[in-house]
Image: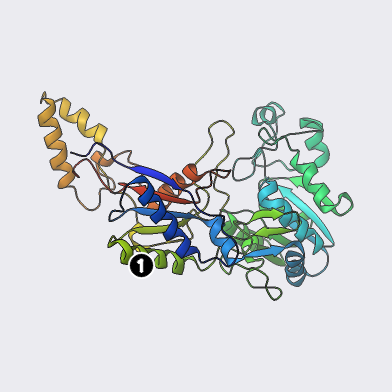
Amino acid sequence: MRTVGTTVRGIRCPIFRTGDDLAAQVVESLKASWESEGYTLRDRDVIGITESVVARTQGNYVTCDDIAKDIRAKFGSGTIGLTFPILSRNRFSVLLRGIARGADRIHILFSYPSDEVGNHLMSPDKMDESGIDPFKDVLDEARYRAVFGDVVAHPFTGIDYVTCYKELIGADKVTVSFANDVREILNHTKKVLACDIHTRARSKRRLKAAGAEIVYGLDEICTAPVREGAGFNPTYGLLGSNKSDDEKVKLFPRDCQTLVEDIQARLLAMTGKHVEVMVYGDGAFKDPVGKIWELADPVVSPAFTSGLAGKPNELKLKYLADELQKTGADNKAVKETILQKIQSKGSDLIGKEESLGTTPRQLTDLLGSLCDLTSGSGDKGTPVILIQGYFDNLAND
């Protein structure tokens, strides 16, 4: 009987560069790994490739000037309102610099006490002590500073993001306020760029219904090349981008479906095994200390092979063990009964007592989180992840 279930390997790869044949290099890196480490691929193994190397090999970059050009084309002159931006130098600082170049003036409306992914602008406890109601109160910068102080530093980065963002724009052309109703921005301008990620559709709908004249989201900026050679993403625009340098960002990758299917076909031809392949970005998990939800990308996986569609369909082993223990059966009988239940389980266990607590999230969200935690965002040098045995269960010998 097998003694190991799911295993995860970070695959060392070369440094990928623009124009590289990524599919070929991923396959060669996997081959070098299994030959060196003495393992073999199996059917239904999962190969994850981080979105960063996909975008890099595509050369999918835009500059601040590219962003400014598209902003000016869409909004024209006057003040632009930026609503609910996330607090991140990596994710937003270069975007903000580009947006500022394309605008005459900017008013930023921050959500509070934190942005949508959990980066805090203030202490929730101090907010409560001050009698501020986040459901209805609108704060200007003067009140914000009077209550929370001149320097409100992010607990992890030590950055005062209000000051940081104002300096990026230029203090003479920006004002800020704080509210949790996106329509508050219309008291300052009728031209709005919705900068939120996962709530963007609702924000844009509410703004338009409330009388905004021009409304776009970050997902609608740089959706086509603004000049020859410029990057773009027709689906997500600037969402999912990361800082490359002070004047350039790497966009979320585009046209990924062809890549994952190409790698799947190459490995089938090479090994005879039908593996699943996905491109992954941020994992969908939350830090319990900093309260930051990791998912700053628009989706966990922008492309995956068909076998990764859907959700897990699993029984809760702890529940079965506890219930069978009540019968007084010995360990051997309990295990045999559990194996029989696993082998005969239905194809849809949603709502069934024996599946309670099995976290029926999308497979790609679960696998993408596992990939992201394994590869990290630092210097591990493993942008390709191999997951084996994920679809096995106790009944598989």
Closest to the observer, 89 or 383? 383
Identify which residue, 289 or 396, lies in the foreground. 396
Numbered-mark total: 1
Task: Look at the image and tell me in which quarter the C terminus lies.
Answer: top left
In the rendered image, which residue does mark 1 sit on?
Answer: 265
From the viewer's side, name the closer residue of 54 and 351.
Answer: 54
**What amino acid type should be assigned to the residue bearing mark 1?**
Ala
Percent x, y for residue 388?
A: 33, 48
**Quick check: 16 left or right of 26?**
right
Q: Name the residue located 71 percent from the left edge and 59 percent from the top edge.
A: 248
Classed neighbour count for the residue bearing mark 1: other residues with Cα under 10 Å, few (<14), some (14–19), many (≥20):
some
- Residue 62 position, x and y percent, is 69, 64
Q: Is residue 288 visible?
A: yes
Residue sitting at 37 percent across and 66 percent down? Answer: 266
The reply to whether residue 284 is visible in this rendering is: no
- Expressed as whole percent of the image width and height from the top left, the position of residue 57 reads 57, 63
Quadrant of the drawing holding the N terminus? top left
Q: Secondary structure at mark 1?
A: helix
Residue found at the very far bottom of the displayed protein: 228
On screen, residue 1 versus residue 392, left or right, reads left
Q: Is residue 102 toward the left or the right of residue 226 in the image? A: right
Q: Position of residue 193 (x, y in %)?
A: 70, 60
